[in-house]
């Protein structure tokens, strides 16, 4: 069977996928690059990016586009939600099931054909929760974003 380069799971690609799934803290490409380089010292950042794009296209991983920050990569391909720390940017999976009934409810009341939805929770991670200044900065950021949404 002839496989295109895009479909073939190269050694590099498999290793990138393994690293991403081993520690699913939703790293940026830079962080992942550092981890993969421990195993493949000669790999380039460009190769990491290219393989992350292909893995996303293959449905093996997800590329997370978060407002105002670098892209993050997720080793879990299925639908799930995230919690983001407003202070340090730590990103964890939210331990709740996808709210598919939301889309059903909307189906009844909109002229749009609903294709999906995104939902992200915001808060402070345990470390930043202890930091008084981090709390104030986060509270101000939330207040500002709610203000601009209301307008
Ligand atoms: Zn934090
Ligand atoms: Zn995730």
Image (cartoon, rainbow, N blue to C red):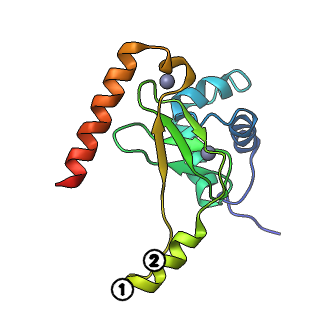
Q: Is residue 78 above or below residue 108?
A: above
Q: Which residue is mark 1?
A: 111
Residue that lies at the very extreme toward the right in this rendered image: 1
Residue 86 in percent (x, y) is at 41, 31
Q: Residues within 10 Å of mark 1 (few under 14, many from 20)?
A: few
Q: Is residue 97 above or below residue 42?
A: below
Q: Which image quadrant is residue 69 in?
A: top left
User: Tags 2 and 1 in contact by the CB under 8 Å rule?
Assistant: no
Q: Which residue is mark 2?
A: 106
Q: Is residue 145 above or below residue 138?
A: below
Tell which circle, 2 or 1, labels the residue nearer the N-terminal end: 2
**Which residue is drawn at the image coordinates 51% and 69% (left, top)?**
116
71 to the left or right of 3: left
Q: Which quarter of the figure is the N terminus placed in?
A: bottom right
17 to the left or right of 142: right
Q: Which image quadrant is residue 41 in?
A: top right
Q: Which image quadrant is residue 109 in?
A: bottom left
Residue 142 in percent (x, y) is at 32, 37
Residue 103 in percent (x, y) is at 51, 73
Residue 64 in percent (x, y) is at 50, 48
Say what secondary structure mark 1 lies in.
loop
């Amino acid at each position: 069977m002839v496989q295109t380069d895009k479909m073939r799971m190269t050694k590099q690609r498999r290793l990138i996928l393994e690293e991403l799934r081993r520690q699913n803290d939703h790293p940026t490409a830079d962080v992942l690059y550092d981890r993969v380089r421990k195993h493949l010292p000669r790999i380039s950042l460009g190769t990491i990016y290219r393989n992350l794009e292909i893995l996303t296209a293959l449905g093996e991983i997800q590329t997370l586009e978060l407002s105002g920050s670098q892209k993050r990569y997720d080793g879990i391909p299925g639908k799930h939600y995230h919690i983001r720390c407003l202070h340090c940017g730590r990103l964890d999976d939210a331990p709740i099931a996808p709210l598919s009934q939301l889309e059903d409810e909307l189906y009844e009341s909109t002229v749009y054909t609903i294709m999906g939805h995104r939902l992200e929770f915001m808060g402070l991670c345990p470390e930043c929760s202890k930091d008084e200044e981090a709390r104030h900065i986060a509270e101000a950021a939330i207040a500002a974003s709610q203000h601009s949404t209301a307008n």
